[in-house]
Image: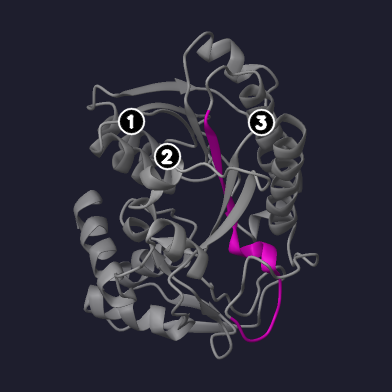
């Protein structure tokens, strides 16, 4: 079945790769993005320029947080599926600009759901949540059935709020929905605010990197191709029956220490890093660790790319993109 997917956040990191995966399987993608300046807009435009080369891709610049923006731009466009990836990302920035998170992650998500409930022929809404909703906890892996009521950051709170909105719309309007809790996704065309991107930039220019509590920090680093490879199948498989809203962890399920990441970047760059050590920052959780049994069972999700290989791929892309 050929899908026509409304993809919000299409110029973003995961959005770009998701669009590529859908287009490669012959689906149509209607992309939207507000192209905000949270990070380098030229990088977002470069992603878009690559997507626009595909005849199955159309793009509209708009802000989903603005009421009626989707309806005005898309008009009578027939949409069969929605992949809502538009969001204000980043834990630390939420301390500086909390309203941007409520606007994008709560109001933006609400507006997508309001648009969705008036569509004829809509089959499924999938959306980005985050591993951040699990908050600070020991051990693992973290399961979708775990109680999540203590978000450690405003960013996490807004993503949890999005999950609750989707649950209510699934019950009220019978819209099949799937929430995707992403665990530290990385790879080529990645976000400049993320640690691996910052480390690469600074190591290649001989600047010292800052490490926050490296002796205790670990993350379930997940290579972007491992995630987007299942999205076409996931979108084509809406929840049915009584449970019209399901949530899945999408992570590597093999956490690495922060120093493992540093070592991988050093090896890929061929340069030893200089570093400063600082204490753990507000909002940062100590560790993330995904239980991915549900996604494996339902969609064949099985991450394969190691941190070392994934970072090598990223550094190769970084050198080419920035002509280094």
Q: Quadrant of the C terminus?
A: bottom left
Task: Find the residue positioned furthest to the right.
Answer: 149
Q: Which residue is depicted at the point 29% across and 32% down?
A: 51
- Mark seen at residue 113: 3
Residue placed under numbered mark 1 in the picture:
1
| Extreme residue in the top direction | 76
Residue 65 visible somewhere in the drawing: no
Contact between labelled residues 1 and 2, with CB atoms less than 8 Å apart: yes
Could you tell which of marks 3 and 1 lies nearer the N-terminus? 1
Residue 139: percent from left, percent from top: 63, 86
Q: Is residue 262 left or right of residue 177?
A: left
Helix, strand or loop at mark 3: helix
Disc 2 from disc 3: Cα separation: 18 Å
The residue wearing badge 2 is 236
Mark 3, mark 1: which one is toward the viewer? 1
Q: Give, as a single range, the part of the protein colored magenta.
A: 123-140
Q: Nearer the viewer, mark 2 or mark 3?
A: 2
In the image, 197: left or right of 212? Answer: left
Relative to 75, say whether 127 is above or below: below
Taking the image as drawn, is residue 267 in sight?
Answer: yes
| Residue 30 drawn above or below residue 179 | above
Q: Residues within 10 Å of mark 3 (few under 14, many from 20)?
A: many
Q: CA distance from mark 2 to mark 1?
A: 8 Å
Dot 2 or dot 3, earlier in sequence:
3
């Amino acid at each position: 079945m050929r899908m026509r997917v409304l993809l919000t956040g299409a110029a973003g990191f995961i959005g770009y790769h998701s669009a590529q995966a859908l287009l490669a399987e012959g689906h149509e993608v209607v992309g939207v993005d507000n192209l905000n300046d949270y990070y380098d807009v030229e990088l977002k435009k470069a992603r878009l320029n690559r997507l626009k080369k595909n005849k199955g891709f159309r793009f509209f610049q708009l802000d989903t947080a603005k009421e009626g923006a989707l309806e005005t731009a898309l008009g009578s466009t027939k949409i069969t599926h929605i992949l809502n990836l538009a969001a204000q990302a980043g834990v630390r920035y939420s301390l500086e600009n909390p309203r941007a998170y409520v606007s994008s992650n709560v109001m933006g998500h609400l507006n997508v759901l309001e648009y969705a409930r008036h569509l004829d022929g809509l089959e499924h809404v999938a959306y980005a949540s985050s591993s951040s909703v699990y908050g600070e906890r020991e051990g693992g892996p973290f399961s979708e059935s775990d109680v999540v009521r203590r978000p450690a950051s405003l960013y996490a709170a807004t993503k949890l709020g999005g999950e609750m909105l989707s649950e209510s719309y699934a019950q009220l309007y019978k819209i099949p929905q799937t929430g995707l809790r992403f665990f530290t996704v990385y790879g080529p065309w990645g976000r400049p605010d993320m640690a691996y991107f910052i480390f690469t930039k600074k190591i290649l220019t001989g600047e010292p990197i800052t490490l926050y509590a490296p002796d205790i920090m670990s993350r379930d680093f997940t290579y972007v191709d491992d995630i987007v490879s299942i999205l076409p199948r996931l979108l084509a498989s809406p929840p049915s029956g009584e449970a019209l809203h399901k949530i899945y962890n999408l992570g590597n399920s093999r956490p690495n220490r922060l120093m493992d990441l540093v070592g991988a970047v050093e090896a890929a760059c061929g340069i030893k890093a200089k570093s400063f050590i600082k204490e753990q920052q507000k909002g940062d959780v100590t560790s993330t660790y995904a239980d991915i049994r549900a996604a494996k069972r339902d969609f064949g999700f099985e991450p394969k790319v190691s941190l070392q290989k994934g970072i090598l791929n990223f550094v190769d892309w970084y050198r080419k993109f920035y002509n280094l």
